[in-house]
Every structure is written in structure tokens, then in C-alpha cells.
Image (tube, rainbow, N blue to C red):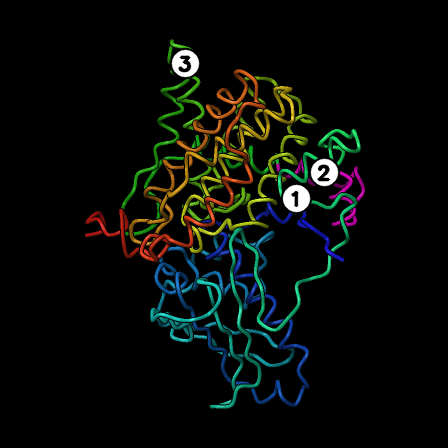
Amino acid sequence: MDKGINTSVFDIFKIGPGPSSSHTIGPMKAANNFIASALQLPVAELGQADKIEVILYGSLASTGKGHGTDKAVLAGLLGQKPETCDTDLLLGLLTDSRKTYKIALGRQKIVFRKENIIFDGKEHDFPYQNTLIIKLKAGRNILLGKVYYSVGGGFIRCEGEPQPETGIPVFRYKNMNGLIRLVKKYDIPLVELLLKNESAVSGLSADEINEKLDNLIAIMEDSVKRGIHTEGVLPGPIGLQRKAAAFYKRAVHMHQDVDRFLALLNAFSMAVSEENAAGHKIITAPTSGSAGVIPGIIYFLKNYHKVSRKRLREGLMVAASVAFIARHNASISGAEVGCQGEIGVAASMAAAMISYVNGQSLDVIEAAAEIGLEHHLGMTCDPVGGFVQIPCIERNAVGAVTAYNAYLLASVGDPKTQKVSFDEVIEAMLETGKEMSRKFKETSKGGLAVCSLCG
């Protein structure tokens, strides 16, 4: 039976450390999975093990050091999980090339060194760019070897293993047209449909879903507050100065309403993105690189438009439905389709969310999502030095402003006269991503990424 889209809201909005869902959260989860698999080996085999080796390919190899992939893999091998990860511990790993780490495999302790992680920058023919192989060895013998793909947004796949089973959605759809058709056919409010599907997929009750959504909103708010009250220089060789705090201080004293609105929205979105760049706890939305757009808007809506917590919860579910469709029919990975799949999808999600909380119709919600993504088509993913800083931080702010503008554009006139559908823009994003040069898809080998800022 075709389940259609069976992704959970809590797979789109994940708790984890920055700076990259595909380069940090995904590899950490892969390492968690590998340790769990290794512990299933016979005790006699485990007793022979003397080495764990990790090989990174594609974008994980070319930008993995700037994204902290090596730290994330080691943290996962040491038992750290994205949701509960000690970010201070994570940031401190592998800073001393002489230090060794002991990885527990039952009673066995495997000594792990920095050189056990290999950055293989050669071209490869794996089906996904973000590929890593983890091996448990006894001398030259491989006791266990697994190939993992980090496919964007913290999602992973393991070669040769089926995807984890989920519940079957009550309402099955594959795209936005199918979702709208179901809402109209069954005369059911969009959020009620999404809530029933979430309960069926995740097995959670409505109260449990709402509690988890409230927790996501609280973490998003906290990341904004941390960011607008933290100054200093971000980690890495670029020496990038944080500016969300200064922007916020300036914004609150602006006299022009329009300027103040834009400045606050910029400050809130950059605040989260700076926290992400610093490796602190954030919520993927839908990725870590685009984690500032939705939290910045939620913070603004809650504190300046006085939108209720209930309405924000529902808005998050609407935003997630946009990400479901983008992921199911294209990609949310910068390494696969460029930043159009990250900031572009985040802006699309946010535009739909803003439209919903402002009481707009389903047709306006779709039009806003379409406009939000349409004007990010072709956006490259070219982080300077492989760090999620330039242009990523300001790009989150621009994405948030674009999302709000997409809502305004969609809410004027008759949305039924919109000439391009959301599903058509998703198709265009996928086609554009396929045709985009590899240099511009999170490899730091082209575009802005090769500028002289790190020199």
C-alpha cells in the first residue's frame, strides 16, 4: 500500500546542535546507529575489535571540518545524541590532535584518534553526496561496515536497510494539489487533517503532539533570546562578528514602524542563525542552515502581533506540511539541490505559516508558499570556508523578510488567479538542483565560497 507522505512533524523540526543538520545531526545519528549495530555482534567478535574507522565523502569531506562533521561523528560514537547533546563537549572534541578517546562497546574499549576520520575528497558514485562509511576492524579484518547517507534535515539512510516503519496516514497525499483536494473533499480544516495524520504516523495523542510542539516553540524562543543578547566572534578562521544583538538594540529605538518591523525580523532570524553557527542547540526548520527563518518569525508573531500559543502550534504544523511535500518530491539538502532546498523551503514554510495565523484561506496559504519558494529558485549553497556563516546567517534574515512579503503578495487579489502552483515550483526546484553544478552545492569549491575572506 502506498502510504503517500508519512513524515512526522517532529522529523522536520528536530532538536540538535548546529551548525548543519546534514553534516552534524545526520552523522551523529549514523554513529549512534553504528554503535547499536556493533553491540549486536557476538561477544567473541567484539573482543577482537581494535579500531573504528570513519570515511567521509562528497560534501561531508569538502566542508566537513567547517561544519564539525568529525566532531559530530565522534560524539555519536561516544554515545551523545542530537536531542540531548552536550554542545560544550561537542565543540571541545578533536581540538587537541594528540588526545585519544575511548569508545565503549560492551566491555570492550576502542581507542579512537583524530586520524581515524578520513576526509576523502575524491569524486564518488554513491547515490547521495553526503555519504559516510563506518567500519569496526580487527587488524585488517572488517568486523562490521556500514554505509550511511545524510540526505538533508538530519535524515539518514543506511545502505541495505529499510527505512524505519511508521504508521499509515489517515489522509494520503503526495503533493499540495492532493492535500488541498482532501481538505475540500472531506470538508475538514487543514490543521485537523494534519493532526490526524501526525497522530497516525507518530502514534502520539493530540495532547502529546501539542506538548511537543510547545516544547519546540519554547526552544525556538530561547535560541532567539540567547542570540539577541550574545555578542562576540563566531568560531572559525573567518573571525565573523555577531551582529544580531547590536541589530536588536538599534531596532527597539527606531521610530519608523516599517524600519523597526524589518530590523526586528532581521535581528531575530540572525540571532538563531548565529547560535546555530556557534554550534549551540537549535531546531531544524527544515535544516540547521535555515534554522533562523521560522523561529525569528514565530518570536515576532508571539511578542509583537500577540499570536496565541495555540495558533502558533497550528502554524508550525502548516509549515511542516510544506516541508513534507518539498522533501517527498524534491529535496531539502543543500548538497543535493543547493540552498533553494534549505532557505527557499524555509521561506516557503514560513510564508504558509504566516498566512495561516492571519486567518487566510487554503488557496492563499498555497500561493504564499509558492511565492516564497519561487523567488529562491537557483540559489546556490556556497558557504565561505565551509562554515555556516557567510552567506548563511544573513540569508536567514533575508529569507524571513521574503516569507513575510510572500504572505502579503499572496493575500492581495484572488489567489485562484495565481498562474504557477506550488507543485510546479517544487518540480522546478528539483530540475534546477539536478542541473546545478556540483561546485555550487555545499562543496565550497565555487561561487562565494572561494572568495578571499579566509586568507
Q: Is residue 324 above or below residue 58?
A: above
Query: Looking at the picture, how far across and down is residue 390, in whole percent?
Result: 32, 43
Visible in this render: residue 270? no
Write down the region rendered in magenta: 194-216
Q: Is residue 438 above or below residue 373?
A: below
- The residue that label 1 is drawn on is 9
Alpha carbon distance from label 3 to label 1? 33 Å
Determine whether label 3 and label 1 are within 8 Å by CB: no
- The residue that label 2 is drawn on is 194
Determine whether label 1 and label 2 are within 8 Å by CB: yes
- The residue that label 3 is drawn on is 258
Find residue 274 and report its image quarter: top left
Element carrying mark 3: helix
Check residue 115 in the rendering and tell me which mark sits there, or answer none.
Answer: none
Residue at (49, 65) in percent of width and height: 73
Q: Is residue 11 magenta?
A: no
Alpha carbon distance from label 2 to label 3? 34 Å
- Dot placed on the residue nearer the N-terminal end, 3 or 1: 1
Question: Dot 3: within a 10 Å radius of its alpha carbon, few (fewer than 14), some, or many (20 or more) residues?
Answer: few
At label 2, which amino acid type do we have? Leu
